[in-house]
Image: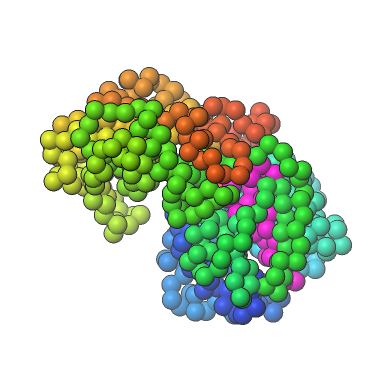
Amino acid sequence: MTDKLHEECAVAGVCINVEETAGLVYNALLALQHRGQEGAGIAVLSERRITNCKKRGLVSEVFTGDALKNMPKGRLAIGHTRYSTTGNNTLDNVQPFVTEYLTGRIATAHNGNIVNAKEIKEKLKNLGVDFAATSDSEVISSLIAYHIVKNDNDEPKGVKEAVKQIRGAFSLIIMTSTGKLILVRDGFGFRPLCIGQNAYGIMAASESVALDSCGFNFLRDVEPGEIVVAENGKITGAERFAEPGRSGFCIFEYVYFARPDSVIDGQSVYKARFDMGARLAKEYPADADCVAGVPDSGLDCAAGYAYGSGLPLVSAFVKNRYVGRSFIYPSQIERESAVRVKLNPLKFNIQNKRIVLIEDSIVRGTTSAKTVKALKDSGAKEVHMRISSPPFKYGCYFGTDIDKAENLIANNLSVEEIAEKIGVDSLAYISLEGMKAACSDCRLGFCSGCFTGKYNVDIDRCDKEILEAKEKCSGIEK
């Protein structure tokens, strides 16, 4: 239906002194649903046994009232929501992964993508390890289990030795059958991971909004290259497995992926988007009557553009929030008008108006063309589109689903040609410098490889299977 970039995955975990973990993780996953809608799972530790419930679908579909009610009581639990690209969307690939070894079990939830999964998998197969799924996340869980055994069941040490061998993006939450919650973030800090605390214990999640929704106060972010261990509701250890170096946080978290009410690595997502809009107004002003954003990700940036330009901010669309994922279009006519099923123009605000329309990105241009056509068909006199990210020209190997380079519109057409193709009267993208400046509160450096082609990890060493999967599925497994 759209050519938007797809969200990644979400992880969450709790270590508390009361037996209410399943419900807390469920609420956290609901707050993180925007990061993945294809599958969800929760694993609970109860009397040294790990019970894992996972299915395809949204969090609310997987955990109906009875399913959640039947989860065991426990003081330790982790959860995951999944968006897939290379791995088939089967139950086997839904997380968390539970891996059994000689003296125990672990459950692992992973957000990111590792680029040496095939190499690790072959080594483990030669050691007699079996694999049921096609996800790199299962490889990580098996590698960790192997090193726990190798290190005399010292779980933090085993995790440390395992993650030293992994290349790429990984934010991990690991639950052990001995009662430990172990948090890991790769040395570049590609993907977010934060910690919250309240009177009952500790929660970790991909975004701070999950902590807010569950009544935990933000404590801190897990640092790039850091392992944090919690037991009995308290943090009991933290150490680095990688020395601080060049960080590479995915800047598109601030542009689109994260919820605006999250704060990641010191940067308010809302403020970043607002400031992107204000900078766009200075970089690329437009002779127009009003400013509007494409719901939802363009709204905060539109507010910033209106502030920076002095133009009034209006609502150009009404979003239908009751259309499910499975909505189908049985005829060509319905398929062509599909954009108006979810976004219908608000004619009162746009008729005979020159509109500055704010969007977060253009990938292939198909959705943008339909959006602009809907506005003009509803009476807009002019549409001037402004984009809060630079043109996409390269793929991502670290957990974001971006189409093949040859399918990206910015690689085939000039800005003027893109404007003509999607039907706008003018088009401009924020500069890379302007986007980074809007995110200047972030404590980390950024990965902007999808805009520049320059990555923090040597992509020439990426697994052949990942590159083949990218060609086949136009994306990377989360």
Which of 107 and 119 lies nearest the eye of the viewer? 107
Q: Colour scheme used in the picture?
A: rainbow
Task: Work out whether 285 lies above or below 227.
Answer: above
Residue at screen point 56% across, 31% down: 449
Q: Quadrant of the N terminus?
A: top left
Region of the chain picked out in magenta, as a range: 169-193
Q: Quadrant of residue 181?
A: bottom right
Q: Quadrant of residue 280?
A: top left
Task: Give percent across and percent down for residue 244.
Answer: 73, 42
Which of 459 and 344 lies nearest the eye of the viewer? 344
Task: Give percent across and percent down for residue 173.
Answer: 64, 59
Is 76 a magenta residue?
A: no
Is 182 a magenta residue?
A: yes
Q: Can residue 451 be seen? A: yes
Horizontal side of residue 90 vs 278, given as left or right: right
Task: Give percent across and percent down for residue 415.
Answer: 36, 22
Task: Give percent across and percent down for residue 293.
Answer: 30, 42
Task: Work out whether 382 lies above or below 70.
Answer: above
Which of 340 and 259 lies nearest the eye of the viewer? 259
Horizontal side of residue 246 vs 400, given as left or right: right
Q: Can residue 77 be seen? A: no
Residue at screen point 63% across, 72% down: 201
Q: Quadrant of residue 349?
A: top left
Residue at screen point 50% across, 35% down: 437
